[in-house]
Image (cartoon, coloured by chain):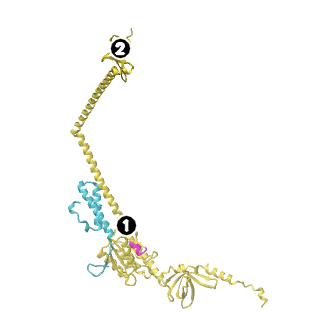
Chain colours: A cyan, B yellow
Amino acid sequence: MAKNDQKPIKGLTYEAAFAELETIVTELETGEKPLEESMLLFERGQALIKHCAEMLEKAELKVQTLTGEAPDGLKDNE
Amino acid sequence: MEQLALFDASPRWTVTDLTRHLRQLLETDPDLQGIWVQGEISNLSRPASGHVYFTLKDSGAALRCVMWKSEAARLRFAPQDGSAVEAHGRIGIYEVSGQYQLYADNLRPLGEGALYQEFLRLKAVLEAEGLFDLSRKRPIPELPHRIGIVTSPTGAALRDMLQTLQRRMPLAEVILAPTPVQGDEAPPALVKAIQMLNKMAAPDVILVGRGGGSIEDLWAFNDERVVRAVTRSQAPVISGVGHETDFTLVDFAADLRAPTPTAAAELATPLTVLDLRQTLVEMGHVLEGNMMTLFERQHALLESHQTGLRYYSPLRRIESERQVLDELSRRGNAMQAHRLELTGARLKGLGNRLVALSPQAVLERGYAVVTKNDQVVSSRSQVREGDALRVRVRDGEFDAHVSGNGG
């Protein structure tokens, strides 16, 4: 993944972050990238792991209720 | 008449023997064992022993019944005086009171039997249609992002499911489709909830359930409309209806059947937060391992280049020539040292010989040197009687006079 199409990690969902992490691991495994780029990938991989771990730490089940009437059909349920 | 009695052939019994005989008659009659008896409950009592005593009666007769504590504990409804029920059990006699009675092992509201017949009929129909085929079952996603729940918004089932999901997979998002789960309005509402969930929320998996209850309470989950809605759901459905022992047609139609709502929530989250954490830790190790491998490979590459460079470099020739020089100079030095050593040894020999020739060495051996007026006396002719001489020996000198000149 080139540097310029990297999204800020903060906004990534767990699934997206984990999927990117898997890609990075594979890319490092094949070892086809130049060393400097590999270093950047490695650092991003570590940041993604940290992000995922934090998400697991802070996760709160989100519950919404289908109203069945409203057009979007969803409402927050506290 | 008194006398005739002597010849009376009528059998004689003790009360105990007779009662035991009757008891055996009743208890060996297959028509009286494992039977259902319909009636209305009266005189229900439940003493401290926990056993339940009651009378079943209809317009024509009454039957004493007893249900032992262990069986009574399994009842799913609370029998009351006036309840129309079916009791299952065997007829026996309580010898102490001579009372025949029904030893009941199960009790259900009247009408449940008919419901069960209907359950079996519908099950056969739907089964024949293939709706319960294993080949229809869809896999449950390992990590569902969005979980639909179809249940009563006020029931314990919802609370149990949410608690379980929060504990196991709080990353998930829950979409609740609230619906009544019993009564006549339940089946169409359940159908609508399943359809709406699929249409509006497209969940990864749907949990359909409710807590325990009587067979009538659970009946909506045997409704044909609900069963068909489950089989038509786009998202795979996990059912969790009632308790472990309850099986409804929705359970057969669901992609996965859980014994309880809590278990349904567990089955919906095969991977838990703990699993994800573990995976992250492992990914971290793999990531570091891969980076290490890269570094090592790079390092090895560098090293092999360095070796190659050294091999082809003119430095190598210079170095080898320097080595030759070194060798030569080392050999030169050694020769020089040898020569010096020889010279040294020769000098030392000369020194020794010089020492041996010195007069002191002669004195050491016991000789003396005699002088007269500082002239060494080496002949008789040099002295006369009365001459003063000086004598030098090993450790010093002294004076002497010539007392005679031989002759």
Residue at numbered disc 1: B274
User: Which residue is at a point 23% across and 66% down the rendered structure image?
Assistant: A8
Pinpoint residue B220: horizontal percent, then vertical percent. Answer: 40, 81
Task: Give the amino acid at mark 1.
Answer: Leu
The quarter of the picture where residue B366 lies is top left
Q: Which mark is residue B74?
A: none
Dot 1 alpha-carbon crowd within 10 angstroms: few under 14, some 14 to 19, many 20 or more: few
Frontmost of labels 1 and 2 is: 2
Foreground residue among B173 and B276: B276
Q: Which structural element holds mark 2?
A: loop
B35 on left or right of B194: right
Residue at numbered disc 2: B386
B235 in the magenta segment: no
Task: Give the amino acid at mark 2.
Answer: Gly
Q: Chain of mark 1?
A: B
User: Which residue is at a point 32% across and 12% down the rendered structure image?
Assistant: B382
Q: Is residue A46 above or below residue B264?
A: above
Q: Is residue B129 visible?
A: no
Foreground residue among A26 and B133: A26
Q: Chain of mark 2?
A: B
Dot 2 alpha-carbon crowd within 10 angstroms: few under 14, some 14 to 19, many 20 or more: few
Q: Which structural element holds mark 1?
A: helix
Q: Is residue B31 above or below residue A16?
A: below
The alpha-carbon separation of the residues under discs 1 and 2 comes to 133 Å
| Magenta-drawn segment | B259-265
